[in-house]
Amino acid sequence: MWDLRTAYLDEGRSSTDEVASLRVEHDSAIEEHNSIAEDFEHLCKNFDSMVAGRNFMRDEVERV
């Protein structure tokens, strides 16, 4: 860890700024992950609805 901090300081970067930047990047990645999870949940619900509709139509055709 000290080597990493020293490397940042040697490059003229503030380790505090870098940590803040990494936190922002982390928060952005979390938001993107949550968005993808929500999209996946919606897709699963839509798929389940389509399967239920298909099963209903199949049952109706079999009755006729």
Image (tube, rainbow, N blue to C red):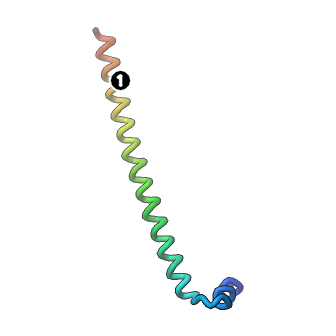
Who's the residue at 68% across and 83% down the image? 4
Q: Nearer the viewer, residue 48 or 14?
A: 14
Q: Nearer the viewer, residue 11 or 32?
A: 11
Q: Mark 1 falls on what kind of element?
A: helix
Quick one: label 1, few (<14), some, or many (20+) residues within 10 Å?
few
Above or below residue 33? Residue 1 is below
Who's the residue at 41% across and 57% down the image? 35
Q: Residue furthest top?
A: 64
Q: Residue furthest front?
A: 12
Q: Position of residue 54 (x, y in %)?
A: 35, 25
Is residue 26 toward the left or the right of residue 59 in the image?
Answer: right
Who's the residue at 71% across and 85% down the image? 3
Q: Position of residue 7 (x, y in %)?
A: 68, 86
- Residue wearing tag 1: 55
What amino acid type should be assigned to the residue bearing mark 1? Asn
Above or below residue 51? Residue 16 is below
Report the number of numbered marks: 1
Q: Position of residue 56 (x, y in %)?
A: 31, 23
Q: Position of residue 11 (x, y in %)?
A: 66, 88
Is residue 22 toward the left or the right of residue 10 in the image?
Answer: left
